[in-house]
Image: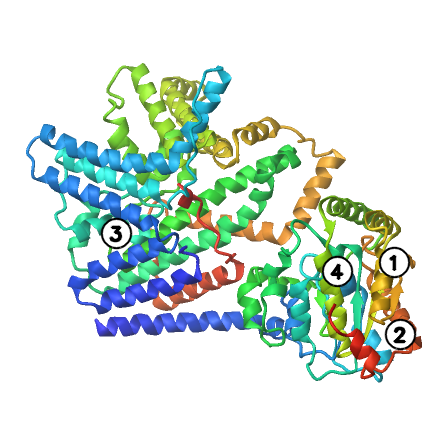
């Protein structure tokens, strides 16, 4: 009997070995951070400068372009730590995740806080945030490669999709966190997507309300980031249709953001009406994203930021 | 704890290791403990229900074993039936009958009291283990089976974890002697069991769960998808999904039992290759069909009565079978539909013979069988609409729209199909591969034992094949621990 047990165990061991060998194909994908549109942001090192927001910022702002022009002024590494409207609207969970991702010793970073009405909206009761149950709310370890916690709890794609998506690369998450999306941009395709997106956002506008809790979290986010360097609030360009919808949905949004920026002594740059090409009325096309990032860098170069260690700035950084 | 979960991946090897490591006299106790742990991983409190009905059935069987005549045994039979069927009624059917009664009273404008609904969660597998216990009790009552005197062994017969939550519904005469035997470590048998488990897992995580990704969006909101081609696709996908899901579960259950030295009855024999609906029911969920045949249909008189009565018996059995699957009108209609199929099939048998003679099909048995397989498949697939739909209204809507929007030259339909195929392209390819592989393997296995065929290959070829199967499961599988469809019954 013992020889039969040994035979079984040794053969099962070989089988497990063969499977592990087969799974080694995934090595470059996993270690390169190309698991999905989010994973790489949890394997990269802690950041000195961040871009935070939703998918609009994830696709619209390229850290590499900013770093090229502003790298000498601000601390790196630079990372786009924006996700999606589902995962990273402003709230306690996103704030905790941002706090984990910023290098504790960073004092001269640049932090771009992308804002729009949707990232301050909520469905359901105040204080109950759906993203608490997502990786944003659940992941304690945000700089680990491979990030086993993410892989075992939040990676839901079948393994073949990891290889296929890597090979076809419609979406490619760059090491600096910029999400490059390669989709058709002929006018008919874009028109169809814009129509669909508008429909989606109309539904959102009907079901969501402005959240005081999210607004408070945004203020705490700005205050926290100010402890580590300069903060700039940015409203990204969108298509005319969506902008009109946003103005109807939250007519006072812009003045609210200006007030908030003034209170925290941070600049607020509103590009929402600027004519940049989008893929769907919401997300900038790749070339537009590069152009917008360059324009943003240029405008930031012109800004004179107060010294982060000054008393006034420290006072403004106190959470509200 | 699902068979396709990480929890089971740890649980099962530990149980197997302990089982063969322990002296034989402790193995039964280990399996009983493991089975209750397995069951309690869903909801611990329901283990009390399982224990309660087990004790009542054991006592009833034990007492009946001491009595000579059926008349003396009868009170104990009733005690057990009330305990089992009462549990089933309270947990599964009370709210259904309550709603139906209130609706009827409302429709007829009758005065009615406000009967409160039970807010109880349906215990997993309750329909399976109660039917297994009822079968045992009836066998003991009839004198076909000697009552089990060992409480632990009887409890294991009811609760044995591989078949506790979704069958196969075993018979006391088949299983109890196996629990009395010692099962030595048998390399070939264990490998064969593991092979069956891996194949079942493939059917579940590669075929069934992937097909569910097409089926669910359409069946959960059919009014958003009123196009015939999509509804037909979703229905066909569900036809294979439910087979992959349930037969996959059964393979895993039979494989797990085999690893531990036990043999369960076959529950599926290539059902979609049946050439008639009666044949389908001899090949689909065989343990349940046999149960209804032996404990309901034959006691009602079976086919040895006047034709009208025999048809009535068939209909009654299938309506009960529908209700067994779930307390919902959809299941009742599904069962009724199959009952009607069977009645029509039996009634029209001479007519079909004549038609075959007249058309010359009788001279081409293969062609005739092929046609039979196609027609049967169509009828079964149509009936699945009622099984899967969330409500009778949805099922009727889907039925009404199956034939609409088939003008493939119309821009709308073509655009819709193109969008669907583009959206699901890789998933469709994987699903098609999985279904073809599943059907191909089962087709090869229809005339000879696939297990024996595999076992006859050289060891190197076999193990390379096992590694390939494991990698297919790992790469193509969906591992978000989706429950098995039949766990709800």
Mark 3 vs mark 2: give the one in front: 2
Sequence-first disc among 1 and 2: 1
- Which sits in the foreground, B156 or A142? A142
Q: Tell me where residue B337 appears, x and y as whole percent.
A: 44, 26
Query: Is residue B468 positioned above or below B147 on the image?
Result: below
Residue labelled with disc 1: A255
Residue labelled with disc 4: A215
Q: Can you tell which mark lies on residue A271? A: none
Q: Tell me where residue B83 appears, x and y as whole percent.
A: 25, 37
Mark 2 vs mark 4: give the one in front: 4
> Do the residues under discs 3 and 2 have CB atoms within 8 angstroms?
no
User: Residue extending furthest right?
Assistant: A302
Q: Name the side, left or right, on which A183 lies relative to B458.
A: right
Q: Secondary structure at mark 3?
A: loop
How many marks are shown on the rendered structure? Answer: 4
- Quadrant assignment, res A218: bottom right
Q: Name the side, left or right, on which B174 lies relative to A17.
A: left
Q: Secondary structure at mark 2?
A: helix
Q: Can you tell which mark lies on residue B263? A: 3
């Amino acid at each position: 009997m013992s020889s039969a047990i040994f035979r079984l165990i040794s053969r099962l061991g070989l089988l497990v070995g063969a499977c592990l060998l087969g799974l080694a194909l995934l090595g470059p994908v996993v270690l390169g951070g190309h698991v999905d549109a989010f994973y790489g942001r949890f394997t990269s090192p802690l950041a000195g400068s961040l871009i935070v927001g939703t998918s609009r910022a994830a696709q619209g702002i390229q850290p590499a372009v900013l770093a090229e022009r502003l790298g000498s002024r601000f601390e790196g590494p630079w990372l786009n730590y924006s996700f999606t409207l589902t995962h990273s609207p402003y709230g306690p969970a996103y704030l905790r995740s941002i706090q984990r991702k910023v290098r504790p010793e960073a004092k001269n970073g640049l932090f771009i806080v992308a804002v729009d009405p949707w990232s301050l909206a909520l469905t359901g009761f105040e204080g109950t945030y759906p993203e608490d149950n997502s990786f944003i709310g659940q992941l304690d370890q945000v700089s680990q490669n491979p990030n086993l916690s993410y892989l075992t709890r939040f990676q839901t794609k079948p393994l073949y999709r990891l290889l296929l998506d890597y090979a076809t690369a419609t979406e490619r998450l760059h090491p600096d966190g910029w999400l490059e999306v390669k989709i058709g941009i002929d006018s008919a395709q874009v028109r169809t997507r814009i129509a669909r997106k508008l429909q989606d956002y109309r539904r959102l506008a009907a079901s969501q309300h402005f959240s005081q809790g999210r607004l408070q979290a945004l203020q705490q986010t700005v205050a926290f980031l100010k402890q580590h360097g300069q903060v700039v609030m940015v409203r990204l360009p969108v298509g005319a249709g969506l902008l009109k919808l946003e103005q109807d949905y939250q007519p006072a949004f812009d003045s609210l953001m200006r007030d908030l920026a003034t209170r925290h002594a941070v600049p607020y740059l509103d590009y929402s009406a600027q004519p940049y090409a989008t893929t769907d009325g919401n997300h900038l096309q790749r070339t537009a994203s590069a152009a917008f990032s360059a324009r943003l860098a240029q405008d930031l170069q012109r800004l004179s930021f107060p010294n982060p260690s000054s008393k006034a700035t420290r006072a403004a950084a106190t959470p509200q | 704890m699902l068979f396709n979960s990480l929890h089971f991946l740890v649980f099962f090897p530990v149980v197997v290791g302990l089982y063969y490591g322990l002296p034989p006299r402790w193995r039964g106790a280990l399996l009983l403990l493991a089975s209750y742990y397995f069951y309690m991983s869903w909801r611990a409190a329901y283990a009390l229900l399982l224990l309660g009905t087990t004790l009542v059935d054991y006592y009833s069987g034990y007492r009946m074993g001491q009595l000579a005549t059926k008349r003396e045994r009868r009170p104990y039979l009733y005690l057990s039936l009330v305990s089992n069927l009462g549990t089933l009624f309270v947990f599964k059917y009370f709210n259904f009958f309550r709603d139906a009664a209130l609706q009827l009273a409302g429709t007829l404008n009758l005065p009615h009291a406000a009967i409160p609904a039970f807010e109880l969660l349906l215990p997993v597998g309750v329909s399976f283990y109660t039917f297994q216990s009822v079968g045992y009790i009836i066998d003991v009552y009839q004198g076909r089976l000697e009552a089990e005197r060992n409480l632990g062994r009887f409890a294991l017969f009811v609760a044995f974890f591989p078949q506790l939550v979704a069958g196969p519904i075993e018979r006391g005469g088949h299983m109890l002697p196996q629990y009395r035997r010692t099962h030595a470590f048998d390399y070939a048998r264990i490998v064969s069991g593991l092979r069956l488990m891996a194949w079942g897992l493939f059917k579940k995580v590669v075929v069934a769960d992937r097909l569910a990704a097409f089926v669910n969006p359409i069946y959960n909101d059919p009014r958003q998808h009123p196009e015939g081609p999509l509804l037909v696709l979703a229905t066909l996908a569900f036809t294979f999904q439910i087979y992959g899901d349930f037969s996959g579960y059964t393979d895993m259950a039979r494989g797990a039992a085999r690893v531990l030295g036990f043999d369960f009855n076959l529950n599926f024999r290539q059902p979609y290759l049946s050439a008639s609906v009666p044949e389908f029911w001899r090949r689909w969920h065989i343990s349940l069909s046999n149960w209804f045949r032996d404990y309901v249909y034959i006691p009602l008189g079976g086919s040895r009565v006047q034709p009208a009565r025999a048809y009535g018996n068939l209909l009654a059995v299938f309506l009960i079978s529908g209700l067994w699957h779930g307390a919902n009108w959809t299941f009742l209609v599904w069962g009724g539909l199959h009952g009607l199929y069977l009645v029509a099939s039996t009634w029209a048998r001479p007519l079909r013979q004549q038609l075959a003679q007249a058309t010359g099909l009788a001279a081409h048995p293969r062609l005739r069988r092929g046609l039979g397989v196609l027609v049967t498949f169509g009828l079964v697939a149509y009936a699945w609409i009622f099984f899967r739909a969330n409500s009778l209204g949805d099922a009727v809507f889907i039925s009404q729209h199956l034939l609409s929007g088939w003008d493939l030259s119309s821009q709308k339909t073509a655009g819709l199909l193109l969008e669907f195929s583009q959206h699901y392209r890789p998933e469709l390819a994987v699903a098609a591969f999985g279904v073809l592989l599943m059907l191909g393997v089962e087709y090869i296995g229809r005339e000879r034992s696939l297990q024996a065929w595999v076992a006859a290959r050289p060891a190197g070829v076999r193990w390379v094949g096992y590694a390939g199967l494991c990698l297919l499961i790992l790469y193509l599988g969906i591992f978000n621990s989706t429950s098995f469809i039949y766990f709800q019954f």
